[in-house]
Image (cartoon, rainbow, N blue to C red):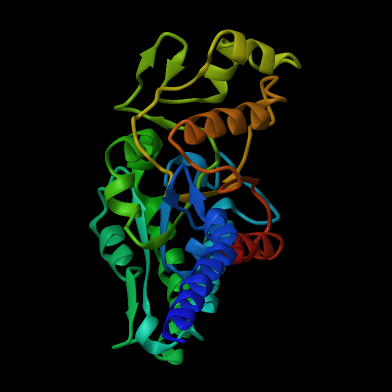
Amino acid sequence: MMKKLFVFVITSGILLACASEPENKKNLVKGKPHTTNNQNKKSANLNISILLDLSDRIDTIKYNNQSMQFYRRDVGYLKSVAEAFGDEIKYKKSRQLDDKIQLYFDPEPLNPKINDLSNQLKFHVTRDNGTIDFINEISSTYAYFGLEIYKQALKDANHDNGSDTWGFFKNKVKDYCIDKDYRNILVILTDGYIFYEDSNLNEGNLSSYITPKKIRQKKLNTSNWKEVMESNKHGFIPVGQDLSNLEILVLGVNPTKTNNNDYDYDVLKKYWSDWLYGMGLEEGNFEFKMADLPANMDKIIKEFIKKK
């Protein structure tokens, strides 16, 4: 009797193992455990970084827009990002709270008031401070101090020097924006062009910058721009970073409407896409959006942050 029982137990164990094998195989990639991106992102805490381009793109004289100035659009985008951050964490169990949102510039503005204001926009929400009231205040804080930052930036004559977006990716993005075991999101507020006075590098047809003038010089302002770009290997100089654990949302893209630059948006999007995917950014984790009124962008911003 004991012998029969032993055989039954062994046989049952083998059958159970076989029954579970297909499910285990679903979670294996080349012999290693694999969890889908959605599972990873759903369980991770949020780490949202915002990079502000405070170059002359915000100038109300150079780039005047009667419906709404571009810096005011940025402030609306900031508020939407902060609201989305709050919406994602406010109903978490307090013991699970470990979420961050912060704001960066590159280069650091010479105006010390801007740096002081940006410190007001660094939040780390934990079980010790994560009340509903505290979380709800984050979006209004971003709207208020964000507007103050732009007011100060407009007084800063140094904003004509550009914004070092390429340098930020080369030297800072990994340290500043990517934390282990977090869902890392970088929101960039920019017109899509990249230029910084102290960082104009060229390596063959690759460069650290792209401007309307550069696009025309490369003859990328005609309908065959893609063919020209791919055959001549135009693009940004690689910076050797691994961004596979990062999602990027670029907002405020504003291609010039003058000087026969009708294809600038397409060229800019390909420059950015080739560059970021070349750094391991996953398909679907990058979006590139034209400047629009904050009310229209609100849904896009919140869906991007909520999507995983």
Which residue is at a point 65% across and 65% down the rendered structure image? 298
Q: Which of 170 and 191 lies nearest the eye of the viewer?
A: 170
Residue 145 falls in which quadrant of the image? Answer: bottom left
Q: Which of 153 and 282 lies nearest the eye of the viewer?
A: 282
Which residue is at a point 46% across and 42% down the rendered structure image? 30
- Residue 19 position (above or below residue 132): above
Residue 173 falls in which quadrant of the image? Answer: top left
- Residue 207 position (above or below residue 167): above
Q: Quadrant of the C terminus?
A: bottom right
- Residue 128 position (above or below residue 254): below
- Percent of width and height locating residue 20: 56, 65
- Percent of width and height locating residue 279: 43, 34
Asked whether residue 109 appears in the rendered view, the answer is: no
Which residue is at a point 38% across and 12% down the rendered structure image? 203
- Percent of width and height locating residue 125: 35, 78
Q: How many marks?
A: 0
Is 156 on the left-hand or right-hand side of 274? left
Asked whether residue 57 appears in the rendered view, the answer is: yes
Which residue is at a point 68% across and 12% down the rendered structure image? 227
Residue lying farthest to the right in this orientation: 223
- Percent of width and height locating residue 296: 71, 61
Is 302 on the left-hand or right-hand side of 156? right
